[in-house]
Amino acid sequence: MKRKMKRLMALLLASVFAVTALTGCRFGFASDPDDPNAVTQQTPIDTSVDTFSYDSELAGTKIVLLNTKAEIQVALEEMSEVFEERSGVHIEVMPVTDGESPYTKVVSLYNSGNPPTLSILDTTDVIALAKEKAEELSGEAWTAESEEYLTKVDGAVYSFPLCIEGRGLIYNKAVIENALKEEFDPSAIKTQDDFVALLDRLVQAGIEKPISMAKEDWSLGAHQLQYIYEVYDGTTEGTQKVIEGIKSGEIQLDEYQRMDEFLNMFDILKKYNVARKDPLGADYDEMAIDLADGRTAFWFNGNWAWPNLSEAGALDDDEYGFLPYFLNNDENDFANQMIQGSPSKQIMMDGRMASDAQKAAAKEFLNWIVYSEVGQQMLVKKCNLIPPFKNNPYEPGDPLSRDIYKHVQTGRAFNASAIVPNDHWSVLGAAMQKYLADRSDRAEVRQAITEYWKEQ
């Protein structure tokens, strides 16, 4: 009954979203902000043990945390309240409004002379602002707990890795097993041909178009297209090598193997897309409903899509997970074995205008997230984030984050982040939308990418 009611509500919400979309409103980058009026099941936090040492001299200090990750706004507010109860430090959690650029927001706050003490930003933004605006954090103890997820600028650390996010082909295990009448072992799908064979079997079993494919420019221009940089060798350094090579002309995209491999996989997703007849008319929320209800079996997305799936009726004990973005038929290619997982959001500390007391309070809050038994729980159980800190013993609650977490813990995730300009996803996302809709060919896609980087 609970599942049916959730799915009924999801269908009603999708109708509302469809009407609102006509007015030009946007509901967020990847998922909607928490509704403070919604009635949700509270995740219990054990507060009986807290060995963290608080600095009593910081009591009464006030700091501001700029939040650019809308879906954790309510959770961050709850965290700040708990932290204040224990430390005496007040944290104002300032949201970035829908449609507002995080980078533009933080720069405008600096220009007004009132920057936040802490800012949750994308890695690209941190790199752009670090040396001019940020406090160096290289000497902080938590750097030892997250060494492989640190972002460095000229060898120095200027940001706190808030979480790990990963992406790939989300699968609904029950849908696949119900269609094929056999157990589904995701590890048995090792190559692009294996994946196509699975799709063909699902079609024969009655799932006419097994794939949901988002049409949003951020999904196409960032989450999909950026594979051409990230799978060069699976490292952030490798992504920069590719980008610099495209800029200089050293890498010609018509000769770059990963470019063709990416488009081959993209074409497969296009072919089996449930919205194949009108790919640019696809509705994001309906895709979540399709996957939860079994109209499709796969949805290219990331673990941030769980709120959408949950609204569509998916339950925390359902079996969802990720397959890699298969690029070829080499079983030994890391791209066919591993999920992309990287520290997508960073917290930057103001180094220009914050007082010594505010900096100390901000550092205490970051340490509290890493070392307090209460902070560790709230990061995972309240914010529902995948912790990048190896000392955090808590496993995420939803199946998508659990699967990414397991990939990371077992060495089946590669950490590569493409450092690209803020307009990369919108400009090249538009080029990918044309290709998705069969309004351009491969040569035009390659030309759009080449021209974009020549202008940088």
Image (cartoon, helix red, strand yellow):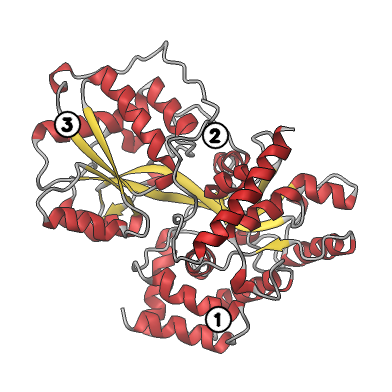
Dot 2 lies on which element? loop
Q: N-terminal of the two: label 2 or label 3? A: 3
Image disc number at residue 434: 1
Image disc number at residue 304: none
Q: Are there few (<14), some (14-19), or many (20+) residues within 10 Å of tag 2?
A: many
Which mark is in front, 2 or 3?
3
Q: Are there few (<14), some (14-19), or many (20+) residues within 10 Å of tag 1?
A: some
Q: Which residue is mark 3?
A: 62
Q: Quadrant of residue 174?
A: top right
Dot 3 lies on which element? strand
Q: Position of residue 305 (x, y in %)?
A: 56, 50
| Residue at image coords 52%, 88% | 444
Q: Considering depth in this image, is 192 or 427 the residue closer to the camera?
A: 427
Q: Is residue 233 visible?
A: no
Q: Which residue is mark 2?
A: 396
| Residue at image coords 9%, 34% | 356
Amino acid at pointer 1: Lys
| Residue at image coords 10%, 48% | 352
Q: Considering depth in this image, is 54 or 80 the residue closer to the camera?
A: 80
Question: Mark 2–mark 3 contact, CB under 8 Å?
Answer: no
Q: Are there few (<14), some (14-19), or many (20+) residues within 10 Å of tag 3?
A: some
